[in-house]
Image: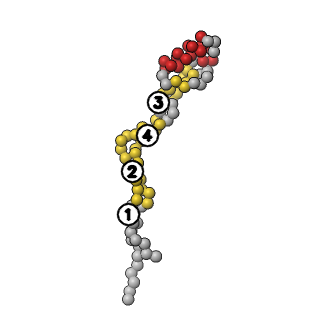
Amino acid sequence: MDVPAQEEVGHWEDVYWMGSDWVYQCNGCKTIFSTEDEAADHNINECINGNLTCGSYTMIGGEPYKHYTGEKYWVVDTPAQDEVGHWEYR
């Protein structure tokens, strides 16, 4: 079976790496805070209000997200293909 040549087909994708920002989680109620000050204020207020389980917090990794580098790379969806055929004699 003869097959015509076919060019490579693909697309560009952005280069990125996965990471997350530090957040602060209350050790009592597990509420997440963006800043250490917010977590500290929460814990102080909860202790004053009698909720002693919220007396401390822990710094943890937040939700992961993509950090784009501004570079791109080529992804081949369909590789190039040489023509396939045959010779016939008369």
Give the mark nearer the N terminus: 3 vs 2: 2
Q: Residue at x 40, y 44 (%)?
A: 15
Measure the alpha-carbon separation of dots 1 and 4. 31 Å
Residue with the mark numbered 3: 21
Say which mark, if any, is on residue 12: 2
Cα separation, mark 3 vs mark 2, equals 28 Å
48 relative position to 63: left or right: right
Label 4 sits on residue: 17
Image side of residue 75 versus residue 30, left or right: left
Q: Label 3 amino acid?
A: Asp
Residue 28 percent coordinates (x, y): 61, 21
Q: In the shown orientation, is residue 51 left or right of residue 9? A: right
Q: Nearer the viewer, mark 2 or mark 4?
A: 2
Task: Name, please, the residue furthest toward the bottom.
Answer: 90
Task: Give the residue displayed 50% in from the left and 19% down from the top.
Answer: 38
Is 76 above or below relative to 39? below
Question: Which element carries disc 3, helix, strand or loop?
Answer: loop
- Mark sitting earlier along the chain (1/2): 1
Is tag 1's residue or tag 3's residue first in the polypeptide sequence? Answer: 1
Element carrying mark 4: strand
Place of residue 31 in the rendered image (x, y in percent of width and height, measured from the top left): 57, 24
Color scheme of the displayed model:
secondary structure
Q: Are marks 1 and 3 in contact (CB under 8 Å)?
A: no
Characterize the local packing of mark 3: few (<14), some (14-19) or many (20 or more) Cα atoms within 10 angstroms: few
Tell me the crowding category of disc 2: few under 14, some 14 to 19, or many 20 or more residues within 10 angstroms, Cα based: few
Distance Cα–Cα, label 4 vs label 3: 13 Å
Q: Which residue is mark 1?
A: 7
Count all numbered tags in the image, as a single digit. 4
- The mark that comes first in sequence, 1 or 4, is 1
12 relative to 60, above or below: below
Name the quadrant containing residue 48: top right
